Image (cartoon, helix red, strand yellow):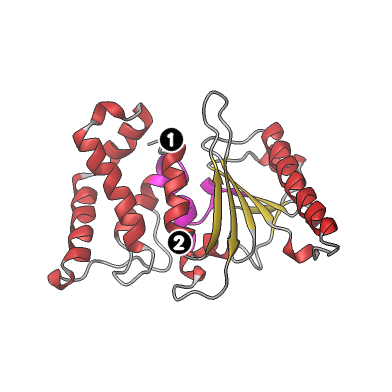
Amino acid sequence: MKHFAHQPFHKQYFTELLHKYGTINIRQELIPDPRPLQVFFSPNGPSPMPLNSLGTLGKMAAKSTIFAVFLHSISDGEVRQCIVTAFEFYAEFNRQANRSHTRVPESEFPHLWILTPTASAALLRRFGATENRENWSAGIYFLPSGFKTAIAAIHQLPRTQETLWLRLLGQSKVQGQALKDLTQLPNDHPFRLPALKLLYNYVQCFSQTPDSFTPEEREIIMELSPLDLQRLEEAMQREIHPDIGDEPQLEPRLREE
């Protein structure tokens, strides 16, 4: 199973999850030259629904952040272009500070997170990217600190609730497992409903106009088993009628199927 092929899914996904927490600006350039979805996010401060409910994704968004979201495995040139974009952003920060005769602390420059379905070991090695297992999940690689950049190789993330919100941006089996995990989230999870609605809307659109979907999108919907679709339907019905009953809950660490 491949990933949702169009960036509008990713755009809606980040908007649904982050818009209540701060300022979000999304640059979408898809045709004719496919480029990563660029998400600029700056948190406003404390919120009634803490960002840590988004696991690793929420941890990334705890400070000002640039997400570069790829639909395919990244190349060396694409990593460099992401870094150039971030440095141009930093330069504009400095120009604004100079005009107002102020100084931007280093801690306020946004961190660049490159999210990619897959990343080769050779590419990570060429950029000197290394893991920080004491503070971050496996599959998160940090470039030397001066670059303020990290690469999330989504196919390497462990199948846990913490990584769910990143794995939904993966492809093939990784995203398929994440979609199933989403339907099993606890009923009281604060991000369960927005994500379910987004997925449910895609399923409903597919059933009404299947020809309007790309082959990749048709494949991802068809890979959902009748049981998965039933769980998704039941999950949405429980949001409308909470007295129907509880669903199976996602374990803190899931077993591989």
Dot 1 lies on which element?
loop
Q: Quadrant of residue 119?
A: top right
Badge 2 element: loop
Badge 1 density bin: few <14, some 14–19, many ≥20, Cα 10 Å: some
Q: Position of residue 240 (x, y in %)?
A: 18, 64
Within-10-Å neighbours for mark 2: few <14, some 14–19, many 20+: many
- Is 214 colored magenta in this rendering? no
Residue 98 left/right relative to 115: right
- Residue 150 in view: yes
**Residue 145's spot in the image, x, y percent?**
79, 57
Residue type indicated by callout 1 = His
Q: Sequence order check: which comes first, mark 2 or mark 1?
A: 1
Is residue 157 shown in magenta? Answer: yes
Which residue matches tag 2? 160
Disc 2 versus disc 1: nearer the observer: 1
Position in image of residue 188 (x %, y %): 32, 72
Work out how far the residue at label 2 is from the one at label 1, CA to CA, in angstroms. Answer: 26 Å
* 69 horizontally vs 122: left or right: left
Magenta span? 151-175
* Label annotation for residue 6: 1
In the drawing, what numbered circle is on residue 71?
none
Say if residue 181 shows up in the picture.
no
